[in-house]
Image: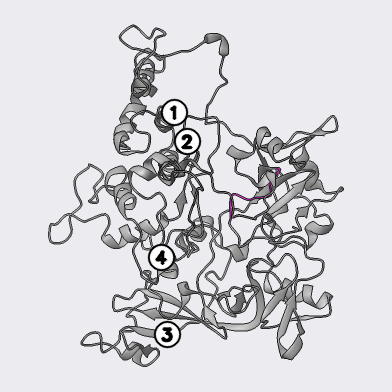
Amino acid sequence: GNAFFDYQGQDNVFWDDQLSRLTKIGRLGDTIMFKDLPNNMRLAKVANRFNDKTSQGQSYVVVCGSRNEVANDPSLGDFGFEIIEHFQNVDINPAAHRESVFFMIALEARDQLRQLMAWQLSQLFAIVPLVLTGGWDHTENFLNYYDIFVRHGFGNFVNILREVTFNPLMAENLTFQDSKSGSYLFETTGSYTHADENYARELMQLFTIGVFLLNDDGTKMLNENGEPIPTFSNDEVMSFARVFTGFVQSQPRGNFEENDSSWNAIDELIVDPIYHDKFPKHDLTGGYIGDGYPLCVDLPSRMFLRKGATYRLLGDSPRPHAFIDEGTPMNDGPARVFELGENSRLREILCNSVNGSCQFQMTVTLDSNIECDTKECQVDEARVLKVHDVYYEYIRPPCVEQVFFNDSKKVTYKNSFRHSSCANPLLPHAAEACCTEGNGGTLTATRYTEYVFDHERVNFSAANVRCSRDGLSQCDFNFVQGDGVVGLHWTNSACQIAIKVNPEGKVAIVYEAMANIIHPNVHKDNMNYFKVYWNGDFPRNSLDENGGNSCGNGECSPLEDGGCFCYIEVDEEAVFSKMPRTDEVLSKLYIGA
């Protein structure tokens, strides 16, 4: 619901004007751990004011500087740049800081070719400072953006595209910051709105491929009618726009130029999975974004212990950065965390002990496979791990989860009246729910008594094994009781995957299961259509157009409001009859989404 501030004995107008400067951390009566406060509030004076005992002694707070930042040298005193006086130390208008720094480096730096390349690239990836937050008086965030082109002036263009895309200034400039998917808006408002298309269009039209296909000599390619061939259509713009949903600013922090404690225009954007579009997105070449990446179902067991597994330091807070789950240890009471054992090789690597003291590194990558130890052998997929009093987050390698699969199972939250969905039983999508008969025939479930951590996920088979160890079995429960009950849980109920086909041949996924409420994103009324590549004609409702094919000659059912409804089944067959060459594998085994 809405929150209202009432300041007794104070002028509300004054407080309302300053509201953006207030950091909201909870509701009246909430208990909040000091270590779970935002970085900009985790201060000694805050701990002393509220007599926080947990902040005393050794603490591990990750504080990152800006890229290429160097320490201040107080012996230099106050320092400014002014080009007219040959860059002498003078006081200048804050609005001219960034221009002065730029001119000093552009005219005086020894790497003039690099500076020229940076300037040219900055004209391609242009932003308009005066329409951006802090555009008239901020320096650091704009120099931070310009440094992208200095760093990569002689490098890979793909690296420039990535850094520009994740930069807060570009996201604000081309309006995709905080863009929300149509599926999220449908879920929360009941109406469907397309994602912001601004950046997707400019990325193709201005930053990369341009409007028309070109020959090697730069002339336009022509079709059989002598007309230029477009590089993309509005379908591709809409598809790519869904890629750039969910981009939000990183958590605010200190140690950079910013007056607003809720704003961070320095650090890279992060992708909030709640706002991000989760459906397939076609590309420019007849495939899908994600083609060429491994399928998640093909990743080896316990990937977090294999060569290349990457871990990121979180500090003394177990809050992850790479994913968002329903419920966190902060607000769900006593937490069960994944604490590595004394004899764990992974614990030894993450500790990085020198003279008996851990020297924690910001990022750790395993250089070889390692054996599991006790609890690690029970876990399908690691998330946040505790090493002494410090937490690391496991970064799963990129992989693709296909939207169509067989033998799907229903998953739901601890209360069955909440949204239910279908999940691939081969993937660690949910926790186990082990069932007993409750009063009045109500099925009440519990978690496996020896589960490892609260947000742990296992595949369906592992969930069955866990329940059997407690002498129980999985069922289509009504409620899951006990601590650590967060996120989705497996049921033994089957789930049916179907599609709606609109008159253009695009499809929307529909889940059918015995449930009170199916998630709006996959409910029969959803409008989350995406492009597919049909092998021949697609099912057409004869009511939609003349010459329809009766929804695939009766294979599918006509819908009253147009289009067709079809149940799907996935057929798999071998591509090769003998060991293929590398180029054959790359050319044929590319399907992602």
Q: Extreme bottom residue here?
A: 554
* Alpha-carbon span between mark 4 and mark 3: 25 Å
- Residue 528 x, y percent position in the rendering: 40, 71
| Tag 2 and tag 1, C-beta contact below 8 Å | yes
Residue 536 lies in the magenta stretch: no
- Residue 42 x, y percent position in the rendering: 64, 38
Which callout, 4 or 3, points at the residue further toward the start of the chain? 4
Residue 369 appears in the figure: yes
For the residue labelled by badge 2, is the local secondary structure a helix, a strand or a loop? loop
Give the answer, above or below, for where 393 lies relative to 472: above
What residue does disc 4 label? Answer: 185
Please identify the dominant SS of the magenta region: loop
What residue does disc 2 label? Answer: 266
What residue does disc 1 label? Answer: 140
* Alpha-carbon span between mark 4 and mark 2: 28 Å
Q: As shown in the figure, which amino acid type bears the numbered disc 2? A: Ile
| Residue at horizontal 86 percent and vertical 47 percent from the top | 342
Horizontal side, residue 555 vs residue 130: left or right:
right
What residue does disc 3 label? Answer: 566
| Residue interval drawn in magenta | 316-323
Q: As shown in the figure, which amino acid type bears the numbered disc 4? A: Leu
* Alpha-carbon span between mark 2 and mark 3: 48 Å
Which callout, 2 or 3, points at the residue further toward the start of the chain? 2
| Residue at horizontal 81 percent and vertical 69 percent from the top | 449
Name the one closer to the observer, 239 or 393.
Answer: 393
Q: As shown in the figure, which amino acid type bears the numbered disc 1? A: Glu
| Tag 2 and tag 3, C-beta contact below 8 Å | no
